[in-house]
Amino acid sequence: MPSALFLWPGAWLRKLFVKNVEEGAPITISNILMAVTLLLINNIIFDAQGERGLFFWSICLQMLLVSIVFINGVMEALFAIGGVMVGEHDLRGFSLLARKSLLTAGVLVLLMMVLMWIPDVVGIMFGIEEAQELAALNQVLRIFSLLLLPFALTLTLVAVYLVLERMVLSVVIIVGQLAMLVLIVWLFATNVPDYVWYAFPLAAFLFLGAQVVYSYVSSRRQNCRVSGLTLIPYSEGGHLLDCSVQYHLEDVSTALNEIVAFLEEMKVEKEAVFDLHLCLEELMINIAKHSTGRVVHHSFDVHVFVKDQHVRVTLKDGGHPFDPIQAGHAAKNNLADSDDAKFGVYLAANIIKDISYKYMYGLNVVLIKI
């Protein structure tokens, strides 16, 4: 029995690590800076208003953290769904998703603002009983609550920029937002400490305004080919083909012929068309044979995008979670048993280099790039 050898995975591991660091950098930097910002503001508020002010700030912070939980939910949906849409070059759909995300984030924080405006509710939740203290806290909460809306919109826009892979812009916005917050709070605490709470919404609105101005100017510089708010391109050119395929081999054959005809019409290289046809044939037949589908999914979808000889294909089906790429690589050592299904996924996983799989929101998603 041959001894096992340790093999260094090579340069691809370094590239994968760098890519993961780049993609996670904005969120990591945001978390680190948020912690530093909170420590700085703690000291600033304590110096300006003492223990009472620090207590009020702790309550405001708790309301802000609850709001961030809601905002993070919206951001995660943007990452998951928006990432697939951008991968499919469905920019129109992503634009609609971004608008709904901004609206959802706005509505959620508005509900938090309403709660913070109701007299005494938040104070009683934190054990404050004295009427004078409740009145003072109510005033602080109502001022501070005005920060939530611009804060939520800025973070949601950052999520949009991240999906569009605008990493530098995302980092600049995250750093700039927190830096402006600390700066303006410090200026108010130093010069007009009695009005320090007004610094929070002022900083948030000023930064959101600067962000919107930058987006508008950037859009104009690109001849309005991108949205003036979200920076989502209106169109990338290229050509699209969408197929809805029933879970039957006959429909798979019809769809494959349609895809090949589309690729030939787009003058894609014959070798690429051959490889893609072979890969899609194995994947689609595997889906038709082995995916039971869901009650609401009577077919699976194939999305083809072609631009300048670059092809992207996305397959989405509602069957049970199944990673054909992993299964194909695992089948490499088990092909001797003449299992057609294993041979099919093995071909699909190895014939094209850039192929990936995700399972999200009840769908198997395979993305192929040539």
Image (cartoon, rainbow, N blue to C red):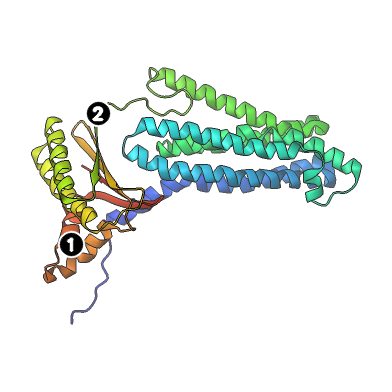
- Say left or right for 284 vs 133: left
Given the current orientation, which residue lies at the most extreme front position? 295
* Relative to 95, residue 59 above or below: below
Task: Name the residue nearer the viewer: 328 or 161.
Answer: 328
Q: CA distance from mark 2 to mark 1?
A: 34 Å
| Residue 207, picture quadrant | top right
Given the current orientation, which residue lies at the most extreme left position? 270
Work out whether residue 117 can be spotted.
Answer: yes
* Relative to 172, residue 350 above or below: below
Given the current orientation, which residue lies at the most extreme bottom position? 1
Could you say whether the residue bearing mark 2 is in a helix, strand or loop?
loop
For label 1, count other residues whose C-alpha is less than 10 Å away and answer few (under 14), some (14-19) or many (20+).
some
- Say left or right for 262 vs 62: left
Specify the quadrant that holds the C terminus.
Answer: top left
x and y, in percent, of residue 224 in the image? 40, 19
Q: What residue do we see at 91% from left, 41% from top? A: 132
Task: Name the residue nearer the viewer: 80 or 53.
Answer: 80
Q: What residue do we see at 39% from left, 52% from top? A: 362
Q: How many marks?
A: 2
User: Disc number at residue 341?
Assistant: 1
Q: What residue do we see at 81% from left, 33% from top? A: 193
| Residue 22, picture quadrant | top left
* Relative to 290, residue 246 above or below: above
x and y, in percent, of residue 15 in the image? 32, 51
Q: Earlier in the sequence, mark 2 or mark 1?
A: 2
For label 2, count other residues whose C-alpha is less than 10 Å away and answer few (under 14), some (14-19) or many (20+).
some
Q: Amino acid at mark 1?
A: Ala
Can you identify the residue that label 2 sits on? 238
Q: Amino acid at mark 2?
A: Gly
Specify the quadrant that holds the N terminus.
Answer: bottom left
